[in-house]
Image (cartoon, rainbow, N blue to C red):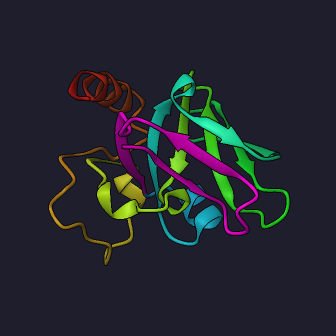
Amino acid sequence: MKYGGHCHCSQVKFETDLLPMIVAQCNCTSCRRLTGIVGVRAMYGQDEVNWNGALSEYVYQGGSGGNIYTQHCPNCHTNVYATLDAIEGVYSIPMGMFSDPTILKPKLEIWTDAKLSWLKDDGCIADSVPDSGVQERIMSLLEGIEDR
């Protein structure tokens, strides 16, 4: 089964044969400002996803101290994916990019110290950390590779 999706205007598309290594919810203020609420992203190895379409880049410093490189569609400005200095070799794809995001649920949430008090999950989140959770994300990625 193939998974994939596209930006709002469909000029940037992606496809993969795999489920993500992990789906994580980020509650940080940067994700809220960039997405409008929280960042829920699926993480894949960079060699596991095929992209089609032109991109533009925005770089900012993440909570872990390393840079986050966000790629956007230059036409509709949809956030297409991000790469992180803290976790090299991984695409972090927003759930909104997926044609069918209902098949994926976050199992890890980070920056719970900044979480909005009214935001709840349905019990899918197994691990929550108050900060950037780099170590937890790496461990979850490794477990996710084994679980595929």
The image shows residue 82 at horizontal and vertical percentages of 62, 42
Q: Is residue 32 above or below residue 56?
A: below
Tell me what residue is drawn at x 38 percent, y 71 percent: 116
Residue closer to the observer: 42 or 34: 42
Residue 8 part of the magenta-drawn span: yes
The image shows residue 37 at horizontal and vertical percentages of 50, 70
Find residue 101 and report its image quarter.
Answer: bottom left
Tell me what residue is drawn at x 37 percent, y 55 percent: 113
The image shows residue 135 at horizontal and vertical percentages of 36, 26
Tell me what residue is drawn at x 37 percent, y 32 percent: 137
Judge from the rendering whether residue 29 lies leftward or rightward of residue 141; answer left or right: right
Q: Quarter of the image containing the N terminus?
A: top left
Q: Is residue 8 above or below residue 47?
A: below
The image shows residue 112 at horizontal and vertical percentages of 34, 55
Judge from the rendering whether residue 98 lies leftward or rightward of residue 82; answer left or right: left
Over which residues does the magenta segment extend? 1-26
